[in-house]
């Protein structure tokens, strides 16, 4: 996308709840993602986390207070295989203060840092990883309307109008 003159990449990914901070569905503006996958290591040397561009996070402060679903802010766990989401691993991530599990933020943030690109990631926390009856409810229109509102608000707040 950046090769085709993309200036800002906004990612919204469905994710599972780790910390019980709210009742799904809700969103998390991902500040940093634990790197438990392989793709991010193609862009940056090993480290525990990939972080969002700080200047973007700062510009998004207070941007989502009046939207329908809550938008929290914090760290997530990026893993590329659901079989790694064991009870023990989830408990370890909960103890580390991670809010949700998803599959792409660490790689996208590593790419953003390595290539000096504007990337911001949201986790749409839609489930408790099959722990309750009727899990995986994403809300009205499977969460599409809320996700589009967040994307539009993000683009406007960061100065993109198109």
Image (cartoon, rainbow, N blue to C red):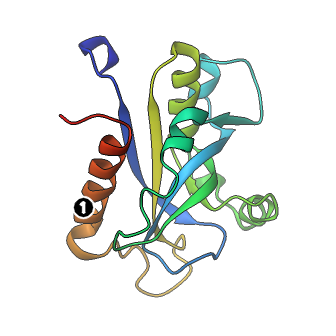
Identify the residue shown where x is 54% and y is 70%: 129
Q: Is residue 155 above or below residue 102?
A: above
- Left or right position of 11 against 78: left
Q: Is residue 36 above or below residue 70?
A: above
Which residue in the structure is indicated by mark 1?
144
Residue 148 drawn at (x, y percent): 25, 55
Residue 152 drawn at (x, y percent): 26, 49
Residue 102 drawn at (x, y percent): 53, 51
Identify the residue shown where x is 47% and y is 76%: 24
Q: Residue furthest bottom?
A: 133
Identify the residue shown where x is 44% and y is 67%: 65
Q: Secondary structure at mark 1?
A: helix
**Does the image show residue 27?**
yes
Residue 57 drawn at (x, y percent): 55, 43
Of 55 and 102, nearer the camera is 55
Picture quadrant where residue 155 is located = top left
Quarter of the picture holding the N terminus: top left
Crowding at dot 1, Cα within 10 Å, few <14 / some 14-19 / many 20+, comes out as few
């Amino acid at each position: 996308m950046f090769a085709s003159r993309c200036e800002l990449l906004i990612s919204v990914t469905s994710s599972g709840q780790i910390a019980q901070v709210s009742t799904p569905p809700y969103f998390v503006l991902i500040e940093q993602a634990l790197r438990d996958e392989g793709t991010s290591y193609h862009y940056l040397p090993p480290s525990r986390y990939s972080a969002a561009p700080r200047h973007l996070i700062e510009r998004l402060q207070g941007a989502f207070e009046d939207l329908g679903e809550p938008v929290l802010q914090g760290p997530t766990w990026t893993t590329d295989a659901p079989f790694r989401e064991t009870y023990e691993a989830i408990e370890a991530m909960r103890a580390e203060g991670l809010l949700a599990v998803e599959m792409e933020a660490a790689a996208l943030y590593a790419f953003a840092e390595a290539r000096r690109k504007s990337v911001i990631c949201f986790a749409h926390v839609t489930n408790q990883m099959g722990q309750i009856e009727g899990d995986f409810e994403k809300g009205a229109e499977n969460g599409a309307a809320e996700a589009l509102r967040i994307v539009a608000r993000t683009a406007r707040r960061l100065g993109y109008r198109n």
